[in-house]
Image (spheres, rainbow, N blue to C red):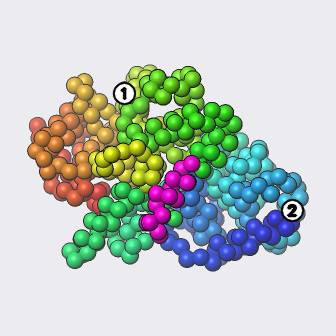
Amino acid sequence: MKTIILNQRKERDELMSRPYLTRRSSQDADVLLGSRLIKLITGPRRVGKSTQALLMLRDKNFAYLNFDNQPLLDAWDANLVMRMLDDVYPGYEYILLDEVQNLDAWDMWVSELYRMGKNLVITGSNAKMLSSEMATVLTGKYLQVEMLPFSLEEFFDWNKFDLHSLEPEHMADALSLMDDYMRNGGYPEVVMSRQLTRSYLDTLFDSIIWKDVAKRHKVRNITDLNSLAMYLVSNFCNPVSANELTEELGLSSVNTTKKYMDYLHEPYLFYYLPRYNNKFKLMNKAPRKVYVVDNGFVASKAFSLSDNLDRLLENQVFIELLRRGYDTEKTMFYYRSRNDKEVDFVLRRGTHIERLVQVCYDMSNPKTEKREVDSIVECSKELKCANLVIVTSNDKRTIEKDGCRIDVIPINEF
């Protein structure tokens, strides 16, 4: 056990020696570390959770355990591990537990460490950590930091541009970067090496399906699971229902389809956006729109003969709204009017609808503009919301229609 922990210390020190982009965050690292509550950093695999934790702790004396390590899991003995941590990291102030969800009954052990007064930073790639394990055993004992792939803002930071103060001579480069980000996403590894995007994300997608879904849930029919995942990534931004998916893909039952869809959300791979309705029962029955955590997965996995620029931009806006704290349970929806006009995003605070957001890559065609404007205006009247936005690739203006004012803004300003 001591050898395993010593090897992990070498791994920790090597990781900390690398140069990193400091991620933008609304939370202050010193304030987080000053709290005795557990610091839980969640998000998809490979978005930089471990890096963020290491950067938070860089100047501190901290112990490190990486549970994405089979020898550690195979030799697990909680009492022995704690003795070895004292040997390898004398006088440590914090413990970083990386990908802790791989340890059986991890939540009980973490709760015990918390009671012992240990100051803990935890990373994990599974949404269920919050929805069940964390929520039951560790209620009120943790602070969450959710991480996603690089935002457009961070992608510009990496390329040494400030997204919010672009000089005219840099606009051509900026437009090229915005297009690159929309098509290839913001996974840190491929931001550094764009030529690796498709092969890297193809492998990562398959790894998530296998390690975080099939293996964790002991799925026997991996072919059906994979077929569903491929269908969802190819139909991103479209409404889907378990009944239709079961029939379309020839899956064994609607319950199995629902279960697999939940499994695919757990590692933050897919999100399902409900259709807004004041009646909860009707909202639950309506198809949900499916989104993928990063546009790069579309480039690497989706079956497509066209660019789907509107859907790529819509998916990008969806992930940006997640970054801002909106969620698909209480504060973000899509909406269809009585005449079947659709608005992409209904944003709510409490019981108040604060904003409607429509996404359209290019509104230069008058027919396209009419369709998008008519849709958002009709939905605004039914939902009684006057704060209306249409996000585009590079169009900026104001449109007045039927007493409604619509702000058309480019994605970089959004």
Q: Is mark 2 on a helix, strand or loop?
A: loop
Considering only vertical position in the picture, is 379 above or below 130?
A: above
Is residue 359 shown to the viewer in this render? yes
Identified at 68% across, 42% down, the residue is 215
Is residue 149 shown to the viewer in this render? no
Which one is nearer the viewer's eye here, 250 or 280?
250
Decide whether residue 129 is among the magenta residues: no
Q: Relative to residue 252, is residue 11 drawn left or right?
A: right
Tag 2: amino acid: Met
Q: Percent from the top left, x then y, of residue 358? A: 27, 44
Q: Name the residue under label 1.
A: 277
Q: What stretch is highlighted in magenta?
A: 190-206
Q: Percent from the top left, x then y, of residue 4? A: 81, 65
Q: How far apart are marks 2 and 1 (CA)?
A: 55 Å
Identified at 48% across, 40% down, the residue is 230
The numbered disc on residue 1 is 2
Q: In which quarter of the image is the C terminus?
A: bottom left
Identified at 20% across, 74% down, the residue is 168
